[in-house]
Amino acid sequence: MKQYDVVIIGAGAAGLMCAAQAGKRGRSVLVVDNGKKPGRKILISGGGRCNFTNYDVSAANFVCRNKHFPKSALAQYSQWDFFSMVNEYGIAWEEREHGQLFCIDSAKDIVEMLLKECDLPTVEQRYRCDVHDIEKTEDGFILKLDTDTVSCQSLVVATGGLSMPKLGATPFGYQIAEQFGLARIPTTAGLVPFTLHDKDKAAFADLSGIAIPVTITTESGVLFKENLLFTHRGLSGPVVLQVSSYWTPGEKVEVNLLPDLDVVETINAMRDKHPAQSLKNSLARLLPKRLVEAMIERGDIQDKPLKQLNPKDITALGDYLHQWRIAPNGTEGYRTAEVTLGGVDTDELSSKTMETKKVPGLYFVGEVMDVSGWLGGYNFQWAWSSGWVAGQHV
Ligand code: FAD
């Protein structure tokens, strides 16, 4: 039986980072992945340009039941550390809005960089390889693989979340947690578009492709300000993806369709200047015309000349446009989600090393645990940080 110091299950962002770090420490490492190549999610991320980190990262950018948990790993291996590595490898990058850092050429640059980091005599990689059984021994683990059985002192679970099943996502990491009696936070799709109830879907069907800057607030008071995109299934765009990670089924969200102006003041000014102008045409100067028409067709807004609006009407219009409440029917689910909320309970793990408290030598890194980042490079930063710290301790 071949013996390794470390076996890492999953050659994604966190697994490759961990492998490189452990290998550099002289640990013999085997990385196994059931897919045919490494870093498949990295390759498709950020529209093929990988939003690899963000200028501004703190624990506040993560959804985790223990909001302090991400702090230690993010401090030990920060966005600046990863950014330095990207620069050392001469990868061309650009900053986009909200401090998001993307590759200029291709996400392949990031995968190639990680593979070069893993190109060490100590690191072996196997693809299209399944793990059939894991057994705990006194001083480590025995793993039954497709072709042979191997042993290791440290086992790192880096199998990611459930999003994008067609890219090979599996619940294997959660099954390992279950095997070892570790608690899990129920998983759901995060960073995912909302679907709408049939009535709303029909009303907004013609708006597909329209994007507007809005703020959305959840019932729990979480607010994001970014673009909302109407789609043929429902609502998407960065603001919806962000809010979806804080939304609970059955809840309404409150959309401020005109966050940068005061509707009452603006309509009053328009009425003074053009009293005969219709409300529809007036609002079409502030919002996409098709959206205004849809709201009139739904009966949410009554079209009439501005001079016929009394102060109560204008206040009600302001309330409606600043606090448009809509109840999503659900989300598009793991099929299109960028991330999985929930996972291995962080109470089971050391925040300094990612080792489980109950099973010495067993580590979880990356998305498989209950740490999910906002849109904007945070999920990869978590993969780099958690993978790096585990790599120092395995
Ligand atoms: P993964 O990168 O998912 O790696 C897990 C690995 O484990 C995979 O290689 C998989 O094949 C392997 N595996 C799974 N099950 C098994 C098994 N049973 N046996 C063996 N191997 C197994 N985040 C950002 O920060 N910026 C972005 O631009 C961004 N864009 C995204 C775009 C899309 C479309 C998606 C879906 C996600 C995006 N994300 C982005 C999120 C980011 O990709 C993940 O959070 C990140 O990849 C998690 O890293 P990980 O190493 O934990 O898991």
Image (tube, helix red, strand yellow):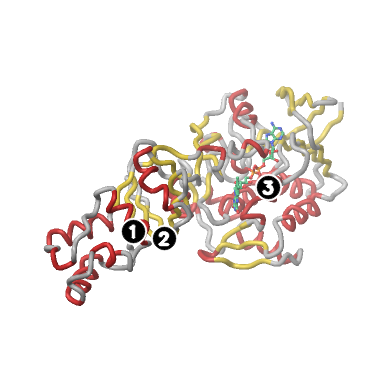
- Type of residue at label 2? Ile
Disc 1 to disc 2: CB gap under 8 Å:
yes
What amino acid does circle 3 point to?
Answer: Ala
Q: Whole-Å distance between the Cαs marked 3 and 2? A: 33 Å
Q: Is residue 365 visible?
A: yes
> Nearest the camera: 79 or 24?
79
Q: Position of residue 153 (x, y in %)?
A: 75, 33
In the image, is residue 212 above or below residue 4? below
Label 2 residue SS: strand
Mark 3 or 2 closer to N-term?
3
Residue ID for mark 2: 212
Residue 301: % across, % down: 24, 54
70 relative position to 37: left or right: left
**Residue type, mark 1 in image:** Leu
* Quadrant including the C terminus: top right
Q: Residues within 10 Å of mark 2 (few under 14, many from 20)?
A: some
Instruction: Establish if 343 lies above or below 20.
Output: above
Which one is in front, 198 or 178?
Answer: 198
Q: Residue at x 61, y 55 (%)?
A: 46
Label disc, if present, on residue 13 of the rendered structure: 3
**Numbered label attached to residue 257:** 1
Where 69 falls versus 137 (above or below)?
A: below
Q: Quadrant of residue 19?
A: top right
Residue at the spot 38% in from the left edge and 38% down from the top edge: 198
Residue furthest to the bottom in view is 273
